[in-house]
């Protein structure tokens, strides 16, 4: 399509009202352009399709090669340049998604971020409009969990990436879900939080995500073929509160760390 033809079509067909844009750093104009259409598609999806109990949460890319500050480059992806979104999906169908702003001080749109120490208490930038968009269901999400320890009830906050999982599940019809994630999200804290919300979770885990030290050491030793595991051996180590199980599996001489939470009040592990 030529530039002139695009301009002719754009003159008569728009998915947004450009007179209602607000100068909001937390919700860039490029996302405001498609927000109404995006919300309509998400709501229609769950009206036409009743989601089952098993869901996957992951990041996704929408191809976009234009000039915009919200363009993200993610190497080794089938679509490595474009707009990044956080998605809750089932059987290839996207049920809900949240936009992502690149940059250290930004992140998932609507998820409250912990500001770096250098930015706390600073002055607001010049020229910033006082107009704010109306908050939607995912705005100001700050997920905290209560963990019972020997010293008492301890409150722990999830980071913005982990909070995405909670925010996406909260946007879906109320039900009990089992969420599958990769090692970008997995941590015992996230899985405790999901369990407190009545959901289960399973996912691969990084050695530094807070899993049992013995499994993390086995992962490192496995690079030299010295993990000490037998072929197809599985080890399960629950957390101290027995809310999350850590598993290490050796299917093909390659240790994979998994975290799994159980549903309800039972101590059943699912992996």
Image (tube, rainbow, N blue to C red):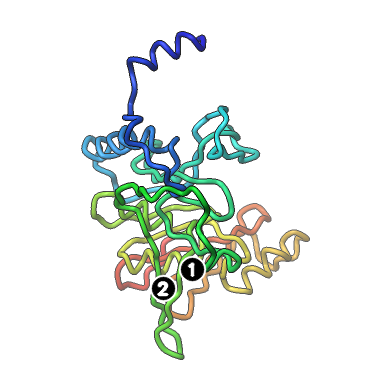
> Circle 2 — which element?
loop
Helix, strand or loop status at disc 1: helix
Residue 71, above or below 251: above
Q: Earlier in the sequence, mark 1 or mark 2?
A: 1
Q: Is residue 165 left or right of residue 76?
A: left
Dividing the picture into quarters, in which one does residue 213 lie? bottom right
Q: Report the residue at 43% width, 37% height from top.
A: 29
Q: Quadrant of residue 90?
A: top left
Q: Is residue 150 left or right of residue 47?
A: right
- Marks 1 and 2, Cα distance to the nearest angstrom? 9 Å
Label 2: how many Cα within 10 Å (few below 14, some 14–19, many 20+): many
Q: Position of residue 268 (x, y in %)?
A: 37, 69
Q: Which residue is denoted by mark 1 in the rendering?
A: 188
Q: Is residue 78 left or right of residue 197?
A: right
Question: Quarter holding the C terminus?
Answer: bottom left
Give how far across and how far down residue 194 sits, in percent. Answer: 37, 63
Q: Is residue 1 above or below residue 90?
A: above
């Amino acid at each position: 399509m030529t530039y002139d033809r695009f301009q002719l079509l754009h003159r008569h067909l728009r998915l947004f009202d450009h007179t209602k844009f607000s100068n909001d750093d937390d919700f860039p104009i490029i996302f405001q352009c498609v927000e109404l259409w995006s919300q309509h598609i998400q709501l229609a999806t769950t009206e036409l399709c009743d989601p089952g109990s098993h869901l996957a949460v992951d990041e996704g890319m929408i191809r976009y090669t234009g000039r915009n500050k919200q363009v993200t480059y993610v190497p080794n992806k089938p679509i490595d340049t474009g707009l990044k979104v956080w998605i809750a999906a089932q059987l290839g169908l996207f049920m809900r998604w949240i936009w992502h702003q690149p940059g250290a001080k930004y992140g998932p749109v609507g998820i409250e971020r912990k500001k770096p120490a250098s930015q706390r208490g600073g002055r607001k930038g010049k020229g910033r409009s006082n107009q704010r968009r109306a908050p939607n269901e995912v705005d100001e999400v700050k997920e905290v969990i209560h963990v019972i320890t020997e010293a008492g009830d301890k409150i722990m906050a999830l980071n913005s990436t982990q909070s995405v999982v909670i925010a996406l599940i909260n946007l879906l019809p109320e039900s009990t879900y089992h969420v599958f994630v990769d090692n970008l999200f997995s941590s015992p804290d996230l899985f405790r939080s999901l369990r407190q919300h009545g959901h289960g979770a399973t996912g691969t885990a990084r050695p530094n995500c807070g899993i049992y030290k013995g499994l993390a050491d086995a992962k490192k030793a496995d690079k030299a073929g010295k993990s000490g595991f037998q072929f197809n051996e599985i080890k399960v180590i629950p957390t101290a509160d027995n809310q999350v199980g850590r598993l290490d599996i050796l299917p093909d001489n390659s240790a994979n760390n998994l975290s799994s939470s159980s549903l309800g009040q039972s101590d059943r592990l699912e992996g």
